[in-house]
Amino acid sequence: MNLVMIGTGYVGLTTGVGFAMLGHKVACVDIDAGKIARLDLGEVPFYEPGVQEALKTMQGSGNILFTTDLKSVIGNADVLMLAVGTPPKSAGEADLTALFSVADHVGSLLDHEVVVVTKSTVPVGTNRLVLARIREAMKEAGREGLTSLVNIVSVPEFLREGTALEDFLHSDRIVIGADDGIAAQTIDKLHEGITAPRVITSIESAELTKYAANAFLATKISFINEIANLADRVGADVRDIARGIGLDPRIGPAFLRAGIGYGGSCFPKDVSALEQLSGEHGYSFRLLPAVIEVNGRQRDLFFKRLVRDLGGVKGRRIAVWGLAFKPDTDDVRESAAIDIAQRLCAQGAEVVAYDPKATDNARMVLADSVVFAPTAIDACSGAEALVVLTEWPEFREVSFPALKDRMIEPRIFDGRNHLADLHLSQHGFTYRGIGLGSYDV
């Protein structure tokens, strides 16, 4: 099929590359000319394992191209996929400005039968509004007789940053929300080559499924963090508890790792948007405010313990390992690590940070308040404490005797329990994790 992907962010680009790998002809459209120029050269503007290599292969095969000119590619489209950003507004609701603008533009150009797919995460009812705007723009362009040939399908994405391409090619489910059976069949066929259950639903159910999935995962994270805080007070180990409950198939082990809470571009935004959506429809979703509160408090507790144990951080040299919101990405949006680094700086600490991939993005957020080191070991030179905030695998592979020699005080505060099983006390470190029964508070 001929697919036009509008939007080349994490979701749009990865999904576009994925469909090209399935054998479709994909035209990726974006208004950012600089980004399109880089993509034309095979340069992915973010770090996502496997995407750049796959992109270059697909460019070589002729299955993918990039343009800023939607008009030049829309005429041959069998499917139009919308993957533009829907960032949160101040009250938490999704900002649909860009999506509606794209809908108007699409409608002004469409002159043939096509299936429109919304890949952006949107509140319930948005797909119908998008379709209405497309059809209205078609009418204004003098193509009222063709509006019935355009249908919309909601296909939420469930990609995880760091494993996005793998998640696309080996999905655990494909949700297709549609009113029109033929349109649903078209999108089912578009995904041929992916062995995964198809969940065919109404448009509204598909829209809500995405929010429900992320809100549930965020709830699991907040729950295990509450258990971790209790474990510290009673002398229990949250890792053992997580394993003990995670082996129950009704619970499962995923997202039961205690730490400083969730972040990133999806969970904070989607949980807040779902809470806002519930309020707009007259329902008080009481669980969600607690999930949000627990996530914020988890950072507070970690930071307060850090400051207390150090006797204050003003004028102290503190090493930070990790700035991305999770490993295998350079994304620092809503990163708990960035938040902790900013709090340290605000209290007068001298922060020296290292992240394998996110330094450039972190530099734009942290400006001149943080010194960035070229290696994990270098970040710790002369430090009075090391704070681990992202669980990058390479942090477990450093020479800890060498690390101890570089530090003034061999103290580690691990916000992810990433080093908890390395028995660092045997190397002379004072080690503090989360939920390991080690805090007398």
Image: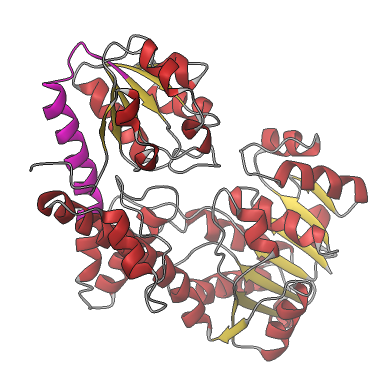
Question: Which of the 4 image quadrants contains residue 405?
Answer: top left
Whether residue 383 is visible: yes
Q: Residue at x 35, y 60 (%)?
A: 256
- The quarter of the rendered structure image containing the N terminus is bottom right
Frontmost residue, 343 versus 408? 408
Does the magenta portion include 169? no
Tell me which segment is drawn in magenta.
293-318
In percent of width and height, residue 186 lies at 75, 80
Question: Relative to 81, is 27 on the left or the right?
Answer: right
Question: Relative to 438, is 48 on the left or the right?
Answer: right
In percent of width and height, residue 371 lies at 40, 14
Q: Residue furthest front?
A: 426
- Secondary structure mostly seen in magenta is helix
Q: Residue at x 55, y 64 (%)?
A: 158
Give above or below for 176 relative to 398: below
Give above or below for 369 relative to 324: above
In percent of width and height, residue 117 lies at 64, 70
Question: Which of the 4 image quadrants contains residue 243?
Answer: bottom left
Q: Residue at x 18, y 19 (%)?
A: 313
Question: Relative to 243, is 113 on the left or the right?
Answer: right
Frontmost residue, 431 versus 185? 431
In percent of width and height, residue 50 lies at 71, 46
- The quarter of the rendered structure image containing the C terminus is top left
Q: Residue at x 26, y 55 (%)?
A: 238
